[in-house]
Amino acid sequence: MNTFVIADPKKCIGCRTCEVACVLAHSNGAGVKALTAAHFIPRLKVIRTAKVSVPIQCHHCDDAPCLKVCSTGAIVFSNDSVQVNQQRCVGCKSCMVACPYGVVEIVTLEKLERAAGTHARQPNTVEAQKCDLCIEHRDGPSCIRVCPTKSLRFVDHKTASVVMKTRQENAALESGEITM
């Protein structure tokens, strides 16, 4: 089973702190510039309705549709998760269409080249972006660390097994006595 982050909509207040943490974690040193409207591209999105607010992000599916349709092999299973290898991504959008959760985003990036102290614009490149569980950060997903209501949690095989066992025990206790 792949690892993933899950949110408890009963605890989420829709503050979007997780989005800010995500952008900063993936800003590649851009810092505050990453928080401007043009550069604010979180890899999770807080959805707010009249009744609920909750961040939606990659589920790192075990049978990942995005991985299956990727013609360049840019989407791979790695470290118990689904990752995008940006060097192989051509921005074809197949993964975006295949994702049942709508969490793969195709992002246009401007390449800047320093030439004699000036910035010459190069053609735009595109890449698929989605939650990568902050795999490059040793402290794990930034969104979990900053959530003020602790509505986000990391789920791995051990955590899932404990939850399943607890739910099975609760179901057995609620069913009462079985007679035949």
Image (cartoon, rainbow, N blue to C red):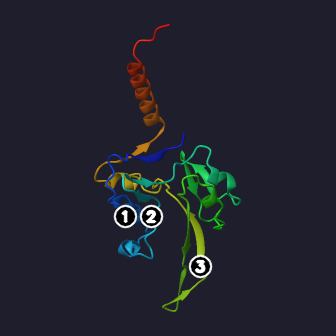
Residue at 34% across, 48% down? 151
Q: Amino acid at mark 3?
A: Asn
Which element is circle 2 on? Answer: loop
Q: Observer-nearest residue: 172 or 1?
A: 172
Q: Earlier in the sequence, mark 3 or mark 1?
A: 1
Most distant residue in the left direction: 148
Residue 141 in percent (x, y) is at 41, 53
User: Label 2 crowding class (10 Å Cα cut-off): few <14, some 14-19, many 20+?
Assistant: many
Residue 68 in percent (x, y) is at 68, 51
Q: Amino acid at mark 1?
A: Val
Residue at 47% across, 53% down? 133
Residue that carries the numbered disc 3 in the rendered image: 124
Q: Amino acid at mark 2?
A: Pro
Considering the image in quadrants, where does the N terminus appear? top right
Residue that carries the numbered disc 1 in the rendered image: 20
Residue at 33% across, 52% down? 145
Total number of numbered labels? Answer: 3
Residue 130 in percent (x, y) is at 52, 59
